[in-house]
């Protein structure tokens, strides 16, 4: 079965074969360090997330996991709200991304948006396809011709 339609099955990676532990539905409460600021442990609690993604602990006593290294992976929080977005005054959609029309144009005449800025966090293949589609929209806007291919629309989603 081709990606991204892999079935949801239990897999074992080399890290698990080497003794790595699987912890699900956990939330980090704090990092504990020594007097020199080096990490020694991570305090976590078990729980669940509701439909609004809010975490609800299900245990009273948190667990302390010894650690020597903590890698923090932060999720994509939308486009950076820097001067470009602020000064242009572009509208944002309900997800915090730059809103755009069917030609990938933002709410500001002549300002086009593609990739993560308009779609949100996604794969590079979507950004490439959106870049091509946005180029077609820019060409159509500038030349009033419809000659460049537009591989996807701004609202297209993966086939699931």
Image: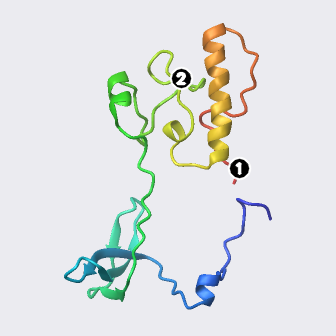
Residue 144: % across, % down: 66, 8
Is residue 23 left or right of 56 when viewed as pictured? right
Residue assigned mark 1: 159
Its colouring scheme is: rainbow
Report crowding for label 1: few under 14, some 14 to 19, many 20 or more residues within 10 A (C-alpha): few
Residue assigned mark 2: 105
Residue extending farthest bottom: 19
The residue lying at 56 percent from left, 38 percent from top is 115
Q: Is residue 92 above or below residue 25?
A: above
Query: Looking at the rendering, in which quadrant would you find the N terminus?
Result: bottom right
Residue 56: % across, % down: 33, 72
Residue extending farthest right: 1
Nearest to N terminus: mark 2 or mark 1: 2
Residue 140: % across, % down: 66, 14
When asked about the image quadrant of residue 57, the answer is bottom left
**Camera-side mark, 2 or 1:** 2
Identify which residue, 47 or 35, lies in the foreground: 35
Q: Is residue 89 above or below residue 64?
A: above
């Amino acid at each position: 079965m081709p990606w991204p339609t892999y079935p949801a099955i239990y897999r074992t990676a080399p890290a698990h074969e080497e003794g790595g532990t699987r912890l699900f539905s956990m939330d980090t409460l704090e990092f504990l360090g020594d007097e020199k600021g080096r990490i020694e442990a991570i305090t976590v609690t078990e729980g669940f997330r509701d439909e609004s993604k809010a975490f609800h602990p299900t245990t009273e006593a948190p667990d302390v996991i010894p650690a020597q290294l903590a890698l923090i992976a932060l999720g994509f929080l939308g486009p950076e709200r820097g001067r470009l977005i602020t000064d242009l005054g572009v509208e944002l959609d309900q997800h915090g991304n730059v809103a755009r029309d069917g030609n990938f144009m933002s709410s500001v005449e002549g300002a086009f948006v593609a990739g993560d800025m308009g779609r949100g966090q996604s794969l590079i293949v979507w950004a490439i396809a959106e870049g091509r589609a946005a180029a077609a929209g820019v060409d159509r806007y500038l030349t009033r011709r419809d000659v460049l291919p537009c591989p996807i629309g701004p609202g297209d989603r993966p086939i699931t």
